[in-house]
């Protein structure tokens, strides 16, 4: 039983789990901010522009009421969250690329192809025979 707790402690304290937990907490806080932005600022502004209060958009069938205005605002909420996340990730990637250039940590692309020494077509790096001209590769000096 103590081995179980030891494994559980190792699992819980791994860096990835902690990063994920922080991400979830920050994401939840971010959703609250964007929801407030949509409900308290964007929805009233759209209401002024369009002349409709989205929270009043309802349909009734029998005893059931469908508040489709709330659904429209939820879609707008989702699109705003997606847009902000896209912009944040794009900015973070640019910052990381700039930092890598300055520090010299630019990743070199892994070479996956080479040129056939006979017909000059691009082929897989580990090919021993060219699929285009069927020449056996490596017979002569290979290109670097």
Image: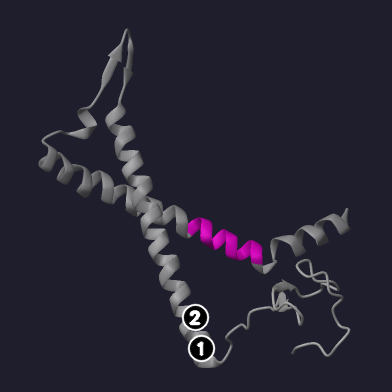
Q: How far from the left and from the top, in percent, is residue 138?
A: 86, 83
Judged from the image, the secondary structure of the residue bearing numbered disc 1 is helix
Indicate whether residue 19 is drawn in magenta: yes
- Kindly indicate the quadrant of the structure image that contains residue 73: top left
Spatial CA span between label 2 and label 1: 6 Å
- Find disc 1 in the rendering and name its residue: 101
Residue 66, compared with residue 53, is above or below; it is: above
- Predominant secondary structure, magenta span: helix
User: Which residue lies at the image location 43% right of the left edge and 68% below the top edge?
Assistant: 90
Q: Nearer the viewer, residue 34 or 4?
A: 34
User: Which residue lies at the image location 74% right of the left edge and 61% below the top edge?
Assistant: 11
What's the mark number on residue 21?
Answer: none
User: Which residue lies at the image location 69% right of the left edge and 74% below the top edge?
Assistant: 121
What's the mark number on residue 97?
Answer: 2
Query: Residues in magenta?
Result: 16-25
Locate the C terminus by quadrant. Answer: bottom right
- Coloration mode: one colour
Residue 94, compared with residue 141, is above or below; it is: above
Indicate whether residue 23 is drawn in magenta: yes
Question: Given contact means CB atoms under 8 Å apart, are the residues at marks 2 and 1 in contact?
Answer: yes
Q: How far from the left and from the top, in percent, is residue 139?
A: 89, 84
Categorize mark 2 by other alpha carbons within 10 Å: few (<14), some (14-19), many (20+). Answer: some
User: Which residue lies at the image location 51% right of the left edge and 88% below the top edge?
Assistant: 101
Judged from the image, the secondary structure of the residue bearing numbered disc 2 is helix
Residue 76, compared with residue 27, is above or below; it is: above
Q: How far from the left and from the top, in percent, is residue 60?
A: 28, 14
- Taking the image as shown, residue 93 lies to the left or right of residue 71, namely right
């Amino acid at each position: 039983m103590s081995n179980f707790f030891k494994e559980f402690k190792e699992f819980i304290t791994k860096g990835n789990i902690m990063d994920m937990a922080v991400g979830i907490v920050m994401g939840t806080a971010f959703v609250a901010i964007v929801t407030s932005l949509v409900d308290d600022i964007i929805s009233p502004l759209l209401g002024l522009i369009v002349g409709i209060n989205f929270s009043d958009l309802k349909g009734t069938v029998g005893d059931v009421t469908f508040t489709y205005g709330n659904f429209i605002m939820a879609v707008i909420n989702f699109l705003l969250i997606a847009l902000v996340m896209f912009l944040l990730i794009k900015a973070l990637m640019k910052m990381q690329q700039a930092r890598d250039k300055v520090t010299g940590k630019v990743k070199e692309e892994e070479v996956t192809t080479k040129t056939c020494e006979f017909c000059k077509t691009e082929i897989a790096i580990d090919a021993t025979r060219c699929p285009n001209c069927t020449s056996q590769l490596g017979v002569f000096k290979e290109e670097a």
